[in-house]
Amino acid sequence: MTDEKGQSEQRKAGGTYLGQAWLVLTLALVFGGALAGVQVAWGPIIERNKENEARLRIPLLLGRMSEAQLDAPDGEQHAHTELDKLSIEERMLEVPRAGGGANRYGLYAVAGKATRAPAGWVLQTRGPGYAGDIELLVGLDPGAERILGLYVLAQNETPGVGNAIGTAKWRSQFADRPAGISLSAVKDPTTDGEIQAIGGATISSQSVCDIVNRAVRDLRKVLPQLRDRQE
Amino acid sequence: MANDGPTPTERFLRGVIPENPVYRQLLGMCPTLAVTGNMKAAMTMSGAVLFVLFCANVITSLIRGLLKPHLRILVFTLTIATFVTIADRFLAAYLYRMSKELGAYIPLIIVNCIIICRCEVCASRQSVPHAAADAVGQSLGFALALASIATVRELLGAGSWFGVQLFWAKGTAAEQYRWSIMAQPPGAFITLGLLLGAAVWIGNSWEKRRKTRAAVREAGEAD
Amino acid sequence: MEYAVGLILIAVSSALINNFVLHYFVGICPFLGVSRRLDTAFGMGCAVTFVITIASLLSWVFTYFILQPGAGVSVAVARLFVTVEDPASVDLSILSYIVYIFVIASSVQFVEMYLRKFFPTLYKSFGVYLPLITTNCAILFACLYIMQKVVGAEEPWGIGQALTLAIFAGLGFTVAIVIMAGIREELDFCDVPGPLKGAGITLIVAGILALAFMGFAGMDRGLERALTADEPPVHKAGHVPEFPPKADVGDNAPRPGNAEGGPR
């Protein structure tokens, strides 16, 4: 009697395990289908968002648009119109470092679409800030003689203090600076090589200067090779 | 399974204050501290939690008859993870900047105790209307809790609310009075600690008042 | 050498500067719940470290070889069925969260079985908190952090970096929870106002701890500068150093092949 009971219990246990498995498998299939649908529908939009983050800023960084225009409701449209006038080539740039290793940058080589005349360079670079990395876009003129603009893509600086490096007002200091001079952040800027540091966030401000200095220096180093490639 | 237990309306009302997930059940602390730096992020997180909790509760309630004890948690987890992925992709597609600001905290909704707890306590035992009302009520309670903390932190830390600058504007002399620690981790902990203390105190005084009123009523009836 | 310096920076950053509990706000539930006594707190810290390491290891393997766009195993399997022109189009990263949570659940299950077999008293003392490690945000956060550094990064993290992050994140969690337990044991003898007893005062103490840990900020920059031979930037007020004019092609100039890489 007990043997039969044990056997029937075993059979039931085996049955329920199989019974439970089909529920999980069905759910997995249904959810997998839903996720595949989401990927197909929204994947391209997400890719575009990621690309646009840097691309949409290129007209701003090359002095073809102002911050106010970009922030306006039709700012994105305007940026796209400007981008349509340009042909942009994306590349990875590697410049060897003095102590070994290399500095890597994302480089956008921008030229006029119709005229094919070089319009400038935009470098995407990152470096250490006060708290974590700061990722920047730096715009330069075709001869790498002047810095035309700066944009902060990502930063983790102290909210309310170092955070201000992202504001348009602070960044506008980098528009139209000579690129041959090393920039530094000071309290009372007097010369071309000095910019106003944020009160209470000297390290954040100086970090941005260091990152920009390094990127500009490296671009100027390899400019002859890049120009040869352009022709 | 009989639909005994609280009615949908009761479930909804309970979730807002009496069984508030943050102040009463002390669940979901991670997003409560992380995204309450400003109101916009806090409300986006509440919206995401509402979506995930609602869908997970409804699906769990629909299949509650088929759930066996062993695989229960597995099924909950699978369901929640799927809906969190959908919410995360939606934010990345249509609210890209907010998605970057919230970062890894949206996927962390998967291990948010609130959702697994509600699936276990309510959705796996009651029908769809109950589960849906419960989801909406708990999410509303969560949103209120987040709003209370985010309001304090954003007003004191930046002088703005929902991004609208109210006082202590940048560039003015008053900017130095910003209590910027409020926008950082220590401010989050201390704000939540003090507000939690306030919530407990309010809860205790309500309890006391309810008991005195009940005692007075009884004494009145005894006469 | 640069690799070792990178590992040291990751270790210091995840244990102290960006402490998982006090900076990223993950792992708060056990932090509040289990920090009453020193020995249980230490045991929980060790268990979390153990689980984080296993889960991060497994999730790195899954992400690197199966889930990321253009991952080796997925592309190979896809090639069996369809022609794949662009490897980057094989992208399973939408399944990441589901894979991670199952990896974590399995890791916890494995640790539970291991403890039950070899350390039964420890297993009993954990009680219900051991399976609750599955819902510990810290572990999923570690997996997500590693995913961020592997998928779409210029220098994707290898297994060494992932392991370093996991172990030292767990150690940082242990340090935080042990400190908190020590403080709470003292608080038992203090006159805490009624409403704040329990979770309230713990959170306020955690806030002060977070304030203290903020003092570690900037340590990684100093360490990096000390350990690498980078030229320190010159920034004295009034000093206007000129860069070498751009026609300078000295010994540091890249060879023609260097100034270009693959498409981004």
Image: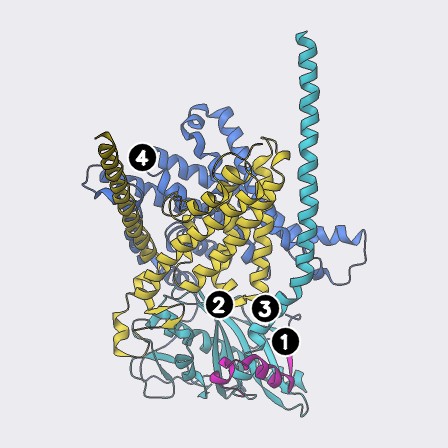
Chain colours: A cyan, B yellow, C blue
Q: In the drawing, what numbered circle is on residue A50? A: 3
Label 3 neighbourhood size at 10 Å, few (<14), some (14-19), many (20+)?
Answer: some
Give yes or no for residue A78 being in the magenta stretch. Answer: yes
Could you tell me residue A142's position as x and y percent? 57, 88
Could you tell me residue C142's position as x and y percent? 49, 50
Q: Amino acid at mark 4?
A: Arg
Task: Name the residue that disc number 4 marks.
Answer: C37
Q: Tell me how far mark 1 sits from mark 3, CA to CA.
A: 14 Å
Q: Residue at x 47, y 84 (%)?
A: A68
Instruction: Indicate the quadrant where residue B215 lies.
Output: top left
Q: Quadrant of the C terminus of chain C?
A: bottom right
Q: Tell me how far mark 2 sits from mark 3, CA to CA.
A: 33 Å
- Viewer-side label of 2, 1: 1
Task: Name the residue that disc number 2 marks.
Answer: A99
Q: Is residue C229 above or below residue B55?
A: below
Q: Are marks 4 and 3 in contact (CB under 8 Å)?
A: no
